[in-house]
Amino acid sequence: MPKPEILDPQGKAVQGALPRLGFTGVTDVRQGKRFELEIEGEVTDEVLAQVEKMAETLLSNPVIENYSVTVEDQQ
Amino acid sequence: MKVGVVTFPGSLDDVDAQRAVRIGGHEAVALWHGDADLKGVDAVVLPGGFSYGDYLRCGAISRFAPVMEKVVEAAKAGMPVLGICNGFQILCESHLLPGALIRNDHRKFVCRDQLLRIENNRTPWTSAYTEGQEIRIVLKNGEGGFVADAATLERIEGEGQVVARYLEMNPNGSLNDIAGVTNERGNVVGLMPHPEHSVEELTGSGTDGLGFFTSLVEKAFA
């Protein structure tokens, strides 16, 4: 997600479109990205640390974005 | 001097940058993103365009191109590196320059002849200008809004790392009207407008951009 202090022009555009469609009461919209990574085998602490590293190095730009990593079982 | 111009897949302004380098009095050397070799160049230009389709974030994939490993290494050793537009985005993603570039605040692509003020002429790319000199060069970007956190902004303003500032109007929402910045050492410069398009009367908006390419030689003989 873009950090709170960073302007999010895309979120602003979405926020502007909502009232035009009759949706009211939304005071702010922030737009981020979601990556779904499929991992081979069990998600150990080591694997999780690797994914954190991926998020920090490539998937996000820590200068302007925050990230969080969550683990979900494959359906 | 031998000035390398890197071509990434999706670079647009590499040929113009090579031409500007030659008009500036240097030898232009084409560098390919997949080469882990700088071919003995004395300086590097990262040109504008949409490298790797701007996928993920502008410059985020290019940063890890084989040639960039060498560029980062050389930049840290003091080699002059100029990133124009997409090149500026790549330098920020590489953390060679502070801050980041985000989508224009008005959300539209902007293309105009833009007035700038040169704030720092102590870099190898701006020494041909006087401090405070006003120049008008081409600007064209969709994601040219310069942002940084408050502490970083205060630091780069205090250290004189702002190289150029927008005058008359702010075309993209850049904080403090910042059009270009340099690193602490002053050898790496990122600029959102395009000096390489403003080097010839015939095809450009004047020749105010030429100084970025003639500066190198003046520095060398200084």
Image (tube, coloured by chain):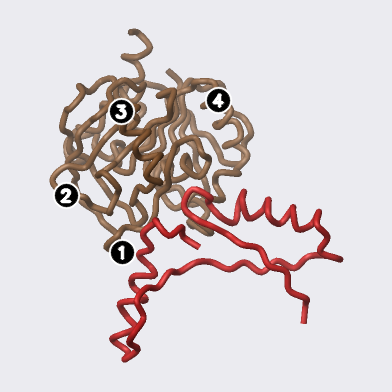
Q: Are marks 2 and 4 in contact (CB under 8 Å)?
A: no
Q: Which residue is mark 4?
A: B74
Q: Residue furthest left?
A: B168
Query: Which of A71/B165 is in front?
Result: A71
| Number of the label disc, if any, that sits on residue A59 | none
Q: Are marks 4 and 1 on the same chain?
A: yes
Q: CA distance from mark 1 to mark 3?
A: 29 Å
Q: Label 2 is placed on what type of residue?
A: Met
Amino acid bearing label 4: Ala
Task: Tell me which numbered mark, 1 or 2, is placed earlier along the sequence.
Answer: 1
Mark 4 falls on what kind of element?
helix
Q: Chain of mark 4?
A: B
Sequence-earlier tag: 4 or 3: 4
| Residue under numbered circle 3 | B212
Label pair 1/2, CB-CB below 8 angstroms = no
Circle on res. B169:
2
**As drawn, B198 above or below A30:** above
Above or below: residue B54 compared with residue B196: below
The residue closer to the viewer here, B130 or A14, is A14
Three-letter residue code for mark 3: Phe
User: Which image quadrant for residue B219?
Assistant: top left
